[in-house]
Amino acid sequence: MTEKSEMSLVVKGRRIDGRKANELRKMTAEVGVIPQADGSAKFSMGETVAIAGVYGPKEVLPKHQTKDDRALIRVYYSMLPFSTTDRCRPGPSRRSKEISKVMIDALEAAIITEKYPATAIEIHVQILNANAGTRTAAINAASLALANAGIEMRDLVCAVASGKADDTILLDLFQPEDNFGQADLPIAVMPNRKEITLVQMDGDLSSKEFDEAMKLVMDSAMEIYEVQKAALTGKKEKKK
Amino acid sequence: MSLVNTEFIKESLNNNVRSDGRKLDEYRDIEIETGIIPQANGSARVKLGETEVIAGVKFSVGKPYPDSANKGMFMVNGELSPISNPNYRGGPPSPESIELSRVVDRAIRESKTVNFEDLCIEEGEAAWMLSVDIYPMNSDGNLFDAGVIAALLAIKTAKFPEYDKESGKVAHETRTKKGIKLQNVPVMVTIGKVGSKLLIDPTFEEESIMEARLNIATIDNGNICAMQKGGVTPITNEELKNAVKLATIKGKELRKLLNKY
């Protein structure tokens, strides 16, 4: 959020990849991609691809972390070393630990944890290819994988970032808009309940711009939900 | 915390009163002291009610990152040290410690208050690394806001040590009069949600019954520069908007106070 782009990111209302300001990247979703896991999913938003595997409910180890009245949710987010422009070091970084933490908050809101007391539900998410919006793609994949594992949930969790680039409020930033943009606002919502489970933001937004950016996300959440639902019910997403 | 206490706090909140007598949108008293650590290049102690946080700045010289060859480096590290609260454990940094560090880091970095080009000594070769370490001495809630204030004032009062270009060594015992000119005063306001109530600057007791937390950092012109939600309970867009409004108003008040230092 610091560099200013040399080239224009928005020209006559169109972005460099041809999208309109309020347009999501093309999404694909697929469940059951990891047969060994209890539930799994692959979710892509444009070139950003996340794969999630859910293991559990299972025994809590170490035992002292057991919660007697509900399930313990664990999230392990990681980026594969070849997923980024420069190779990123494998293993947990401070960034990935923070993302894992906020993903627990974002997903636990939807899981009916009381149904699985004294168990652990582990969610592993790996970014196969990164082109901005990895945490939101990770949440979309994880929420699908949880549903695929048959974990009882209040709603699916749908996530996307909005932000600002070239002084324009944009939905679902991709790499150049993220690198040379002015603000990034990743949000996760439970679309049927209209409840927000993840809020992060960095950059510079006036409160009016913030409202506008939030509106773009809230208005598009159902679109993400439909893609997730189609993957779960096995129905191919209908082309509009 | 005991059930009696939890119930008492929740019940009082229904009448818009907090267990320490504050209003929902009332900040605790702030006490600030700078230059408390002689060995540090800059330092500050911030008390927010009973919460006490110290921050220290240390300068070192390193090679700039290849993708920002004309800029210095910046790092915030925070630790929920066990000395400050019976609920904190030692060992490798917990996700909560990392979140604290990174939220404080973002508030300061994204506000653009430090012009990182000012930290460059020789493009691609040498640049100052600005390391800020935040340590709670007594943790009675809202380490985020206290951390941002302490870090900001430690940076604001920091003076560069002497750097010898020939040998590439930093003479830590010598201090120059040169400091970092800040462009902005980022202020973070943390808001907790309990039931339908939003409360500002939560104590540790309130944090333990809070369902969700919002950190909102604003800059001089009232724009938002960083934000983070914590806690597993969702919030509505309406609550989020109200929190932003609250943070902007309180941010202005806090900024006035910080400008004195």
Image (cartoon, rainbow, N blue to C red):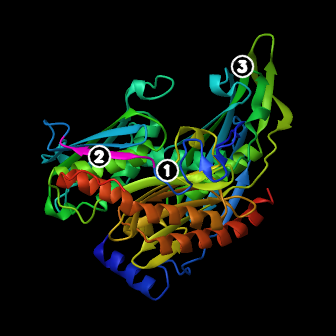
Say if mark 1 contacts mark 2, CB within 8 Å: no
Q: CA distance from mark 1 to mark 3?
A: 33 Å
Magenta stretch, overall SS: strand
Residue A14 versus residue A52 in the image, above or below = below
- Nearer to the camera, A132 or A37: A132
Looking at the rendered structure, which numbered label has been put on residue B91?
A: none
**Horizontal side of residue B193 vs A57, given as left or right:** right
**Horizontal side of residue B22 vs A190, given as left or right:** right
Q: CA distance from mark 2 to mark 3?
A: 43 Å
Splitting the image into 4 quarters, where does residue A118 fall? Answer: bottom left
Q: Which residues are magenta?
A: A25-32
Figure quadrant of the N terminus of chain A: top right
Residue B211 versus residue B136 in the image, above or below = below
- Nearer to the camera, B177 or B226: B226
Q: CA distance from mark 1 to mark 2?
A: 16 Å
Residue B229 seen in the figure = yes
For disc 2, the chain is A
| Amino acid at pointer 2 | Ala
- Nearer to the camera, A88 or A222: A222
Residue A68 versus residue A174 in the image, above or below = below
| Amino acid at pointer 3 | Gly
For disc 3, the chain is B
Q: Can you give x and y, in whole percent of width and height, for residue B205 in the image?
A: 42, 68
The residue that label 3 is drawn on is: B124
Q: Can you give x and y, in whole percent of width and height, for residue B4 in the image?
A: 31, 78
Mark 3 element type: loop
Q: Can you give x and y, in whole percent of width and height, for residue B224 in the image?
A: 64, 59
The residue that label 2 is drawn on is: A29
